[in-house]
Amino acid sequence: QVQLVESGGGLVQAGGSLRLSCAASGSISSINAMTWYRQAPGKQRELVARITTSGSTDYADSVKGRFTISRDNAKNTAYLQMNSLKPEDTAVYYCNAQNHWFSNYWGQGTQVTVSS
């Protein structure tokens, strides 16, 4: 089992920045990829950024060049640095961890609101 706790959400003006954190505990060694998803009201959950244990990253086109995902293995924490935020980035952001057997674990979510 893996437990995930997100933090760092909040209200920010357009053009501002936020950094989300996702602290993992439990069966840490089994984690392969950590991924940030988001879900806006009335929309489906979408992938924002993913990082593997090897450090490979992948981003949604809508956030490329603005968001950066990173991972501190010593702290068992993944981060999402979000710059140049836009109102359309407003959503609940969820952290996901996938283990070697492709089981998925989710955090409780953290609200990000970008005002225009």
Image: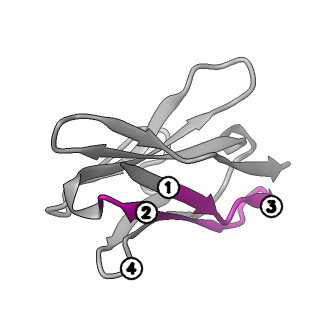
**Residue kind at label 2, given as amino acid type:** Ala
Residue at 29% of width from left, 35% of height from top? 103
Report if the CB atoms under discs 3 and 2 are less than 8 Å apart.
Answer: no
Which secondary structure, mark 1? strand
Residue pointed to by mark 4: 75
Q: Which is more toward the observer, 80 or 67?
A: 80
Q: Is residue 40 visible?
A: yes
Separation of marks 1 and 2 at Cα, in angstroms: 5 Å
Classified by dominant secondary structure, the portion drawn in magenta counts as strand
Report if the CB atoms under discs 1 and 2 are less than 8 Å apart.
Answer: yes
Which secondary structure, mark 3? strand
Residue at 67% of width from left, 66% of height from top? 8
Separation of marks 4 and 3 at Cα, in angstroms: 27 Å
User: In the displayed structure, would residue 4 be above or below residue 19?
Assistant: above
Nearest-to-viewer mark from 3 and 1: 1
Which secondary structure, mark 2? strand
Residue pointed to by mark 2: 24
**Residue kind at label 1, given as amino acid type:** Leu
Q: Is residue 57 visible?
A: no
